[in-house]
Amino acid sequence: MHTTELSFDLRDDETLVSSKIHFYKNPKYQAGDNSLFLDGIDLELISLVIDGERVDYELSDKGVQLRHLKGEFVLEIVNRIHPENNTSLNGLYQSSGNYCSQCEAHGFRQITYYLDRPDVLSVFTTHIKAEAGRYPVLLSNGNLSSASPGQATWHDPTPKPCYLFALVAGDFAVLEDHYTTLSGREVALKIYVEKHNIGKTQFAMDSLKRSFAWDESRFNLEYDLDIYMIVAVDDFNMGAMENKGLNIFNSTFVLADPKTATDKDFINVEAVIGHEYFHNWTGNRVTCQDWFQLSLKEGLTVFRDQEFTSDLHSRSIKRIEDVNALRTFQFAEDAGPMRHPVRPESYIEMNNFYTLTVYEKGAEVIRMIHSFLGEVGFQKGMKLYFDRHDGDAITIDDFVSSMSDANEFDFSKFMTWYSQPGTPTINIKTDYDEKNECFYVEVEQDNEFDYFLPLNYALLDDQGSTLKEGVLTIQQQKQTFVFDQIKSMPIPSWLRGFSAPIHLLSDLTFEQQIFLVGHDSDAYVVWDSAQQIWLSLILTPNTARELLFFNAIEKLVQTRQDKSLVSEILTLPSERFLHQKVVVIDVFDIHQKREEMASKVLGRFKSLLLETYHSLNHAKVYQLTPEAVGERSLKNTCLYYLSKDKGSNPDLARTQFEQANCMTDQIAAFSALVASDNSYKKQAISNFYQTFEQDVQVMDKFFAVQSTSPLATVADIKQLMEHELFSFNTPNRLRSVIGGFTQNYINFHNQSGYEFFTDIILKLNQSNPQIGARLVSVYNHWGRFTPVLKQLQKQQLERIIQSDDLSNDIFEIVQAALK
Ligand code: PHE
Ligand code: ZN
C-alpha cells in the first residue's frame, strides 16, 4: 500500500470512519489470484467503492473479501463504530470521556477494514473531526499539517504498519519541552494528561529527555520526527504503547511525585518511558514480519530498557530485581500449560502471547548474545542490523544474522533459545586434586536439547580473593573444564550476574554458600546464595544451619555498605516462589512456614532491626539516588519484621504512617498496619483514604494493600467492589482488587474464593476478555495443588469452558490448562 488516508467523525452515539487506501500489488505478499481479504471486526460497513465504482464483495464477521482486483487501485470505505460502548480497550475507545486508541496486535481491524498485519506498511494521513468545546486536543501520528477548532489533520511521513496507528481526542493539559538531538535537530516534547494531573508530569518529561540522551550515547540512535507526544489515560490494558510519535500510556507509568509514587514507581515510570521511546528504533523503524517475531522488538527493547535503568541507577539491584521476577513468574509460565518458545509457533489469540517469556526471557536471550559479543561487538551488530533493515518488517533470524555477520560469530547452536520452551537445567560437579593442584569442573545438561550459553564464574580463595574469573562457553551435553595451578581448594562462584536463564544445580556445600553470602563481590551471587539458604531453611528447618546463617547475616547487616543489597538479602523468598520449589503446593503450609521464619528472624534480630530502623529513619529531602533508595528499602524491610512484634505494633508503623514525607514510607507503614489486627488499622484506612481519595494511582495501592492483606476474606473483597471508587471496567482497579486477591493465597484458595473469582472471569469474558485471560491464568497450575484445591480449581475451569460465547482469549488459556 502506498498511502492510507483516514477521516474520523467523532460523535456522541457513533463514530464514522472513512478510509481511502491506495493499493498496489506486491508480489511478495499476495497470491496471484487478484483477491484480497481485509480484516474487520465489530464494524458496520456503510459503503465500499473501488476507483469510484461500486463493486461486489463478501462480508463476514471477520472482514470483507474483494475479488477481481487490478494491479493498482484506490479503495474507499465508510464504516461505523461505537467507541462510546467499547469496553475491550482495543481499537478506538473512551477513557474518562476522552477518545484514545490501541491497535497492537489486532486492534486496527476494530476501527476499519484493513490488511491488519505488521508487514504491510503505509504512509498515513489522518483527519479528525469532533466537537471543539469538549475535544480541544486532536492528535494522531506524525506532524500536524492543519488545524482549526473542531478539526485537525496529521501526516506521518514514515511508512508504518497499522498496529502503530494512534488517535487521541479530548480535553487535556499539556506539559511542553524540547530536546536538541546529537545532530542539532529540535524535537518538541509534549505530555498530555487530564488537567488535574498536570502537577505530576515533570518526572516523566525528565525521563523522556534522559531516554533521548541515553539512546544517543549508548546506541548512537537519534529520534527522527519533529514531535514526540505522550498521552496518559486511566483505562489501558497494558503498560504503554509505542505508536509512532504518539505513545499512549497507562497513566500509572506517567504520573509520579514523591507524595504519591514509591521509589519503585519512579523507576518504573522512567523504564516504561524509556522502553516506548527505544521502540522507535527497535520496533517501529525495524518491525516484525509477523507476530511470531514479537520478541524481535520486545526482547530487544526490554534488554535496552534494563540497560537504561542499570546505567542510571544501581546496576546490581536492577539485576537482582529482574532475576527475581524472571524466576518467580517466567520460570513458572515456562513450566505451566501455556509454556511456549520465545518465538511461539501458534496462537489462537495473539494478545495471550504478550508474555513474560516473549518479553523477559526474550531479553535474557539478547543479554546472552551481548555477553558473547561484548558491548563493542554487540553495537557493531546493532549498526549492521539498522544498515540492513531500517524500514523493513523482518524476522528474529535476520536479527541474529546481523549479530553473527558483524562479528563472525556462529550463533546457529544458540537458536534453541528461540525454538524450545522450558527452563534448561545445568548440573555442575567439581573435584579438587590437591596433589596436582588441579580443579576439575564437569558441566552437564539435563535437557532434551543442548543449549549454547555463557556461564560466568569466578574461583575464590578462602579470603574471598579472586583466583580466576571468566566465562565458560557451554554447548555440549557434558563438558569438563580443568583449572591448573590452583594451590588450595577454591570456592566457585557460578553463574555470576545470572549470565543465562537456567536452573543451576551445583555441588556447593552449605558452608560454601554462606561463605559466598559473606565474601563474593558479585551482588547477584551474594543474593542468590542467600535465597537458596532461605529456601532450604524455610522448607526444611535446621537449627544448626540457621545459626550459622544468622551469624553471617548479622555481620552483613553491620558491615555491608549497600543498603539495598542488605535489604534484598533480608527479604524472604515470596510464597509464589516457594510454590515452585515444592512438589505439591499446600498454600497454608507454605504461608505458615514462611511466617515462622519471619518470627525467627525477628526473634534473633529484634534489637539489630530496631537499631538499624532508627539509624535510617530521619526526615530527609526526597531523593532518588541509589543511597537514598537503599536507606528507605532497608528501613522498610526492618519495619516489616518489627511490625510482627506485638510490642512495637502498631506504634512504630503508626508513627511512620503519620510522619511519612514520601509514598515509599507511607505505603510500607500502611501495608504493615493493614496486614495485622491492631487498634489503629481502621483509622489508618480512613486517614489514608481521606488524604489520597483524589489520586487514582494511590487509590490503586489503597485497594491492593487491602485485597492482599492476610486478613482479607471473600466478603472483604466483595465489599471493596462495592466501594464508590471501584470500577470494573478500569483494568488497573480490577488488577488491584481482583488481581491482588488472587495473590492472597491463603484467602483466595478455597471454594468461595474460586466461585467468586470465576464469576468475575465470566463477566470479563463479555466486557474485556484480554484482561479476563490474564487473570484466569491463576488456575494454570491447578494440577500442582493439594487434592481438594486441585479438584475445586478443575471444576472452575470446566465451568468456564462450558459457558456460552467464550472469547478466544479465555478459551485458549482454559483449554490449555485443562489439557
Ligand atoms: N507493545 C507494547 C510495549 O511493549 C505493549 C502492548 C502490547 C500494549 C499490546 C498494548 C497492547 O511496549
Ligand atoms: Zn515493548
Image (cartoon, grey):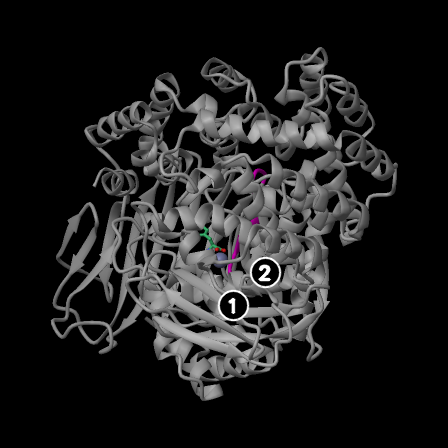
State yes or no: discs 2 and 1 in contact (Cβ < 8 Å): yes
Say which of 600 and 319 sits in front. Answer: 600
Secondary structure category for the residue under label 2: helix
Horizontal and vertical percent position of residue 565: 70, 50
802 is higher (above) or lower (below) than 286: above
Q: In the rendered view, does 515 fall on the left or right side of 106?
A: right
Image quadrant occupied by the N terminus? bottom left
Would you call the spot at circle 1 few (<14 residues within 10 Å), some (14-19), or many (20 or more)? many
Numbered badge on residue 367: 1
- Indicate if the residue with disc 1 has its beta carbon within 8 Å of ligand 2: no
Q: What stretch is highlighted in magenta?
A: 133-141
Image quadrant occupied by the C terminus? top left
Q: Write the residue at 66% across / 58% down.
A: 523
Horizontal and vertical percent position of residue 727: 50, 26
Q: Write the residue at 48% across / 87% down.
A: 406
**Residue at which label 2 appears:** 306
**Residue that extends furthest to the bottom in the rendered view of this protein:** 408
